[in-house]
Amino acid sequence: MAVGFLCLGMAAFGDTGEQDFDLPAQPLSRALERFSEQTGVSILVTSDLTRDKQSGAVRGRFTAMAALSGLLAGTGLRARRIGESALTLVRQDNDGGNGNAAPVPARVAPAYATALRRHFSERLCDRLGDQLGRVRVAVQLWISPRGRVEKVHVLDSEDAPRWGDTIRDGLLGSQLAPPPAGQPNPVTVLITPSDEAAPCAGRREG
């Protein structure tokens, strides 16, 4: 099964190399979508932070982070890195506006990340079927020390309005292996499209 699941935490973020940007001032949510399409960097953010905000114009040759800073100029928001190719946005006044990134969760332990991927596959194949291989949604999970999923928050994405409720219902209250000691909440899991045409076919047949 080749559905992509990325368990996000603090990690190195590649920001080497420049590329050409031609992003006019526009609604911030749309600017972030275009930025993600061009750079491959996922922006995981809730709509209450971007609503009614306009991006700055970014035209020229920049690194991805420099371009994003230009888009966010004047919005009162800043980027926080939460994965190798993922960012979230927070209000600048969260840390007094001094530009220092607030602490972020530690990387999910590899063994537990594997358990999370397996759990997602088992819970969501039954509900999404082959659509699972076409969905791109980011989900935050609050997991109790005993492994119960106590809260599920689906972050904004193009597919969230269509599939968010199904994904939330499939995961909320479910039980998986207890997390490692000290694992912080929430854990963010990014579901990405699969190259496989029918990623759940084998599970259905089984």
Image: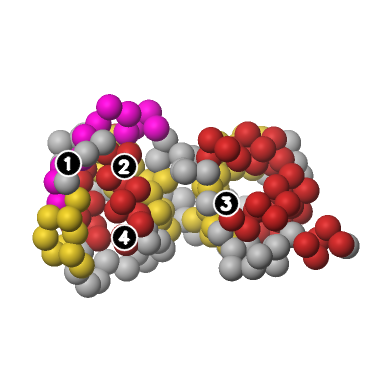
Q: Are marks 3 and 1 in contact (CB under 8 Å)?
A: no
Q: Is residue 128 above or below residue 74?
A: below
Q: At 46% across and 39% down in the image, what residue appears?
A: 156
Q: At 25% across and 60% down in the image, what residue appears?
A: 64
Query: Between 57 and 180, which is closer to the camera in this rendering?
Result: 57
C-alpha distance separating marks 3 and 4? 19 Å
Taking the image as drawn, is residue 78 in sight?
yes
Q: Are marks 4 and 2 in contact (CB under 8 Å)?
A: no
**90 on left or right of 111:** left
Residue at the extreme bottom: 17
Sequence order check, earlier mark of 3 and 4: 4
Taking the image as drawn, is residue 179 in sight?
no
**52 on left or right of 164:** left
Sequence order check, earlier mark of 1 and 4: 1
Q: Quadrant of residue 83?
A: bottom left
Other residues around mark 4 within 10 Å, as few (<14) / some (14–19) / many (≥20): few
C-alpha distance separating marks 2 and 3? 19 Å
- Report the residue marked by disc 1: 25
- The amino acid type, in three-letter code, at marker 2 is Arg
C-alpha distance separating marks 4 and 2? 13 Å
Residue 54 belongs to the span the image colors magenta: yes
Query: Between 115 and 185, which is closer to the camera in this rendering?
Result: 115
Sequence order check, earlier mark of 2 and 1: 1
Which mark is drawn over residue 30?
2
| Labels in figure, total | 4
Sequence order check, earlier mark of 2 and 3: 2
- The amino acid type, in three-letter code, at marker 1 is Ala
Sequence order check, earlier mark of 4 and 2: 2
Which residues make up the magenta segment? 47-58
- Report the residue marked by disc 4: 38
Other residues around mark 2 within 10 Å, as few (<14) / some (14–19) / many (≥20): some
Element under label 2? Answer: helix
